[in-house]
């Protein structure tokens, strides 16, 4: 039996396969496989049309997109950046790539940055000096706030927008996991995640809702930020091809990757429908489970349902999570969520603010298989296998 994985399978029906191979084959035959070629701009335009972001700049990864997004916001060694405790470490590493320091903020029950705690921190622990938001404790300028839309769930951001505007803090949206997620009209007028702050990013890594194999994208409605981003990802080349007045980066997306993206984005709405069906099947099948509940989506956004998170019921020993992962029961791949980033050795020395919920969620949550191709019967199989594994765990103890 093939392992049921937490990693997303892109749609593998015959039509999708043929479409992908046609795009890739044409690109190879045309000899435009590197970082030049028409697929890149066409793919950028497709994403722009889908998300309603005025400017889209394709990169070779979500991480490089984060790095450049912070750089064009002006983040440097004099600054601090607020970021959620729970997010993929690339989000935090991008802060350090720009020589700034992270401030770790707790997350709410949806795993997104806690809006109320963040506002409380800014109101109680910062002051405005010469137009900058200054941390009273460290005396450093808080230049930016990263809002990551974890598991594809739209983060609560409406109040943060207003407070950050008053505090002169730039908002970067890490929408690596949330392409296709958009806010409900009453909350933020149907706007897509990644398009609400001054700048946002997407990821097209192999496990995302659509993939370019590897890739990312910067989203912004600001012409200046877009122009600077495109300049920096292309080795900061000036009009004279080999003249460079700034340090640039080799961060452009290859044309071959963009070709794959073009074949994928056509299927995005279909994938979203399938992912929603998988999520709803999980809710139905685990409704009466005495071991796990399914993390429910916030009602402020229409989510892409990228990842399914199972959470232990209150009376279940948290050690069962490790037992479940190590046993890899019946060829089912479960995966722990990321640990709170302030617990990582390289980030232990940095400031954190009332980070408690992150640790609770880490101890009781697990990623469950959620491919768009996952059937109702397979989810039932997962639920029954968990039940059997828990019986073995009890007996093992």
Image (cartoon, rainbow, N blue to C red):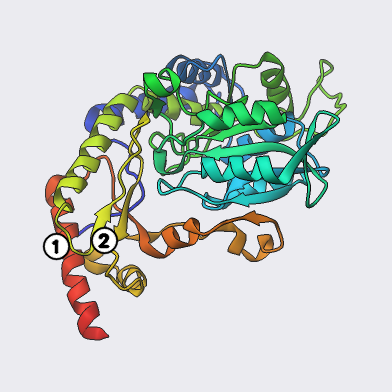
> Closest to the observer: 329 or 107?
107
Disc 2: CA contacts within 10 A as few (<14), some (14-19) or many (>=20): many
In front: label 2 or label 1: 1
Is residue 296 depicted above or below 46 in this figure? below
Apparent side of residue 310 relative to residue 75 in the rendered image (left or right): left
**Residue wearing tag 2:** 332
Which residue is rendered at x = 27% and y = 37% of the image?
275
Secondary structure beneath disc 2?
A: loop
Q: Position of residue 1 (x, y in %)?
A: 19, 60
Q: Quadrant of the C terminus?
A: bottom left
Q: Is residue 221 above or below residue 124?
A: above
- 282 sits to left or right of 214: left
At 29% from the left and 65% from the top, the residue drawn is 314
Closer to the chain start, of discs 2 and 1, is 2
* Image position of 193 (left or right of 318): right
Q: Which mark, by number, is residue 23?
A: none
- Is residue 262 something that shows in the picture? yes
Task: Choose between 166 and 266: the one closer to the eye.
Answer: 166
Q: Quadrant of residue 224?
A: top right
Q: Residue furthest front?
A: 124
**How would you rate the neighbour count of disc 1 (Cα within 10 Å): few for under 14, some for 14-19, many for 20 or more?**
some
What x and y, as percent, mark residue 67?
A: 67, 38
Q: In this figure, which residue is indicated by the disc labeled 1?
A: 384
With respect to residue 32, does 117 lie above or below? below
């Amino acid at each position: 039996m093939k392992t049921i994985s937490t990693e997303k399978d892109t749609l593998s029906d015959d039509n999708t396969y043929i479409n992908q191979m046609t795009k890739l084959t044409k690109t190879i035959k045309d000899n435009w496989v590197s970082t030049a070629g028409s697929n890149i701009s066409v793919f950028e335009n497709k994403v722009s049309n889908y998300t309603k972001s005025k400017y889209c700049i394709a990169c070779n990864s979500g991480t490089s997109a984060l790095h450049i997004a912070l750089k064009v916001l002006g983040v440097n060694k004099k600054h601090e950046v607020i970021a959620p405790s729970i997010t993929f470490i690339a989000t935090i590493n991008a802060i350090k790539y720009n020589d700034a320091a992270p401030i770790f903020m707790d997350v709410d029950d949806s795993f997104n940055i806690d809006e109320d705690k963040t506002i409380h921190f800014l109101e109680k622990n910062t002051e405005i000096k010469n137009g900058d938001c200054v941390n009273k404790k460290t005396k450093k300028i808080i230049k930016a706030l990263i809002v990551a839309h974890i598991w594809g769930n739209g983060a609560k951001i409406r109040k943060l927008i207003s407070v950050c505007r008053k505090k002169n803090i730039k908002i970067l949206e890490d929408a690596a996991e949330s392409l296709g997620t958009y806010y409900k009209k009453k909350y933020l007028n149907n706007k897509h995640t990644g398009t609400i702050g001054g700048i946002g990013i997407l990821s097209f890594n192999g496990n995302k809702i659509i993939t370019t194999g590897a890739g990312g994208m910067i989203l912004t409605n600001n012409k200046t930020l877009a122009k600077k981003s495109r300049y920096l990802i292309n080795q900061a080349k000036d009009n004279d091809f080999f003249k460079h007045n700034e340090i640039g980066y080799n961060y452009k997306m290859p044309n071959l990757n963009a070709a794959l993206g073009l074949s994928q984005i056509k299927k995005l709405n279909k994938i979203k429908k399938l992912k929603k069906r998988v999520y709803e099947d999980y809710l139905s099948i685990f409704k009466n489970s005495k071991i796990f509940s399914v993390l429910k989506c916030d009602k402020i956004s229409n989510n892409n349902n990228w990842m399914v998170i199972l959470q232990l019921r209150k009376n279940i020993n948290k050690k069962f999570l490790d037992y479940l992962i190590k046993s890899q029961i019946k060829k089912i791949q479960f995966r722990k969520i990321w640990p709170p980033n302030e617990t990582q050795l390289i980030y232990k020395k940095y400031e954190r603010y009332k980070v408690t919920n992150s640790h609770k969620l880490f101890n009781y949550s697990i990623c469950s298989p959620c491919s768009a191709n996952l059937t109702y019967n397979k989810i039932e199989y997962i639920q029954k296998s968990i039940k059997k594994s828990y019986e073995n765990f009890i007996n093992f103890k």
